[in-house]
Image (spheres, rainbow, N blue to C red):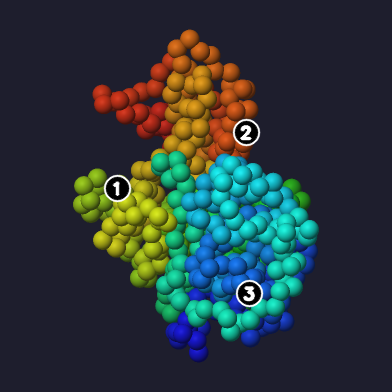
């Protein structure tokens, strides 16, 4: 037994990401691990190819903890790089391929990326990002012949397993970049062990709120640059299941992949579920092997949830967590979905070993039913923000993680998310922080000031709009402003509407009353998210 393993009754528990693959390759080397682009990759081959990546990293990086980025569509190589980083002791940094070169450049420089894997589609973005930032990193393209060292060359190199460092559960495995209230994304440092402790607790307590089995075919609907997608894939691999990978979510392609591979469990955001249900109904399709859909990343309406239960006829489970928790912390289990229609608006109950409290602005714990900031104490959480000790100290206080979400606890211990304390908009599972968007729009010369808020949207949960004030004597051409935003903001961050107004509301000290602007659009809603 390796130093990374512990024994829990009925469970092989692992504390290191690389050990997942090492064990599955030994026990089920010929069984499928990944279905991607119409091809299957077995656990044994995934181990061999990941080991080759690890060998390349060890030869290139100066010691352990080098930062290795990946930007590109989901594919088998993404997971080979992920496991290669884990085996080599490197820090894996998945980057959203929808970002602009300017946004990518910030991540490359902030993380100090040493080596960057990309696909052919993102190679130009990578080149522009490196030129703009002046950052130096070795680039390895997955397509042959486009970079001095391409992925085929990495796979041809001989790997020496004995040269790899020993597992270390406390070592940082990945940096997940999440936007922040200052407008600059922050790197969330997650250690290896943060990905396994919740599953271990669930199984050791005999709870099947979330479960994965070796025979499962698991759809990874959420991209791996999000904590939800990364977490879901690792839990599936831990059980020896095979994952089904989509290069991007398109409802009919998703439905075809689920049917072709007999998907039995799936993880999606509510907007994806909505689109998938439309495709199922329009095509008269059925998914007889689907036993559970796990959803999260954004609130879901009771109507959509009820429709999902009726159309798909499977169990549903809701998860709630943050990049900073490195895992889910709260779950609305399938039984609760069936028990009481009123619970369909709950985020769920905390897992065993996870504590919740709701506090007021002065940090005092509130009684049941009172709305305040939700705080979580969990064994699975970040070690901190990369290079930001003050931000870390603000979020992690006395062992509690302050979420920035406003909610309350009912007498049965269910958490209900009511609103947000932090200024964040969630559209289709993607987070948008107004400050980042406002910083870019405010740099457009005719703009005097602006405010970006989230308003309700039935399909996507929320969508961003902008209210702006023009400089004195200037006129803002909205079409010209949208052209200005191209290349400066990822498409999903751009406001869906831009409205010119005479002024923005402020308090006597001059602070923008964003809440007053936002509330006008949410007055008829039971919750403001």
Report x, y in % for residue 523. Answer: 41, 32
Q: Which residue is mark 1?
A: 372
Please report the residue visible at 28 percent of the width from the left and 57 percent of the height from the top. Answer: 397
Nearer to the camera, 184 or 291? 184
Give the mark nearer the N terminus: 2 vs 3. Answer: 3
Report x, y in % for residue 40. Answer: 75, 70
* 228 in relation to 25, above or below: above
Q: Residue furthest top?
A: 473
Q: CA distance from mark 2 to mark 1?
A: 38 Å
- Mark 3: give few (<14), some (14-19) or many (20+) Cα within 10 Å: many
- Mark 2: give few (<14), some (14-19) or many (20+) Cα within 10 Å: few
Give the mark nearer the N terminus: 2 vs 1. Answer: 1
Numbered circle sitting on residue 55: 3
Q: Is residue 289 visible?
A: no
**Local secondary structure at mark 1:** strand
* 336 in relation to 461, above or below: below
**Local secondary structure at mark 2:** loop
């Amino acid at each position: 037994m390796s130093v990374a393993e512990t024994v829990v009754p009925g469970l092989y528990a692992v504390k290191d990401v690389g050990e997942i693959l090492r064990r599955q390759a030994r026990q089920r080397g010929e069984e499928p691990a990944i279905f991607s682009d119409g091809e299957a990759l077995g656990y044994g081959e995934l181990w061999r190819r990941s080991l080759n990546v690890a060998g390349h990293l060890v030869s290139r990086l100066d010691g352990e903890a080098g930062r290795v980025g990946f930007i590109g569509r989901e594919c088998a190589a993404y997971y080979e790089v992920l496991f290669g980083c884990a085996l080599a002791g490197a820090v894996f940094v998945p980057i959203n391929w929808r970002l602009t070169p300017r946004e990518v450049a910030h991540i490359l420089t902030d993380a100090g990326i040493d080596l960057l894997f990309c696909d052919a589609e993102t190679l130009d973005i990578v080149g522009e990002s490196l030129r703009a930032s002046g950052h130096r990193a070795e680039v390895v393209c997955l397509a042959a012949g486009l970079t001095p060292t391409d992925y085929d060359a990495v796979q041809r190199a001989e790997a020496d397993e004995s040269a790899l460092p020993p597992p270390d559960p406390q070592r940082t495995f990945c940096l997940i970049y999440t936007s922040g209230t200052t407008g600059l994304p922050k790197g969330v440092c997650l250690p290896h062990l943060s990905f396994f402790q919740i599953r271990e607790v669930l199984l050791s307590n005999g709870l099947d709120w979330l479960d994965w089995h070796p025979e499962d075919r698991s759809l990874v609907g959420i991209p791996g640059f999000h904590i939800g997608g990364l977490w879901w894939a690792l839990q599936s691999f831990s059980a020896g299941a095979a994952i089904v990978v989509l290069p991007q979510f398109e409802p009919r392609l998703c439905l075809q992949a689920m049917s072709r591979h007999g998907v039995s469990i799936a993880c999606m955001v509510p907007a994806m579920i909505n689109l998938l249900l439309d495709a199922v109904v329009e095509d008269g399709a059925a998914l007889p092997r689907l036993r559970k859909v796990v959803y999260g990343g954004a609130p879901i309406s009771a109507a959509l949830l009820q429709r999902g239960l009726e159309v798909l006829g499977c169990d549903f489970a809701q998860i709630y967590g943050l990049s900073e928790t490195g895992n889910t912390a709260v779950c609305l289990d399938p039984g609760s979905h069936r028990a009481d229609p009123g619970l369909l608006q709950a985020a769920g109950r905390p897992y065993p070993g996870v504590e919740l409290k709701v506090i007021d602005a002065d940090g005092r714990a509130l009684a049941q039913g009172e709305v305040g900031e939700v705080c979580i104490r969990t064994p699975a959480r970040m070690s901190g923000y990369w290079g930001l000790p003050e931000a870390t100290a603000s979020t992690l206080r006395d062992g509690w993680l302050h979420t920035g979400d406003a909610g309350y606890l009912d007498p049965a211990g269910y958490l209900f998310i009511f609103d947000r304390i932090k200024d964040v908009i969630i559209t289709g599972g993607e987070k948008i922080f107004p400050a980042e968007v406002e910083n870019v729009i405010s740099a457009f010369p005719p703009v005097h000031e602006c405010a970006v808020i989230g308003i309700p949207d039935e399909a996507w949960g929320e969508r961003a709009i902008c209210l702006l004030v023009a400089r004195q004597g200037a006129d803002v051409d909205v079409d010209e402003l949208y052209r200005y935003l191209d290349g400066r903001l990822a498409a999903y961050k751009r406001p869906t509407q831009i409205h010119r107004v005479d002024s923005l509301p402020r308090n006597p000290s001059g602070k923008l009353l964003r809440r007053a602007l936002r509330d006008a659009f949410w007055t008829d809603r039971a919750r403001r998210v």
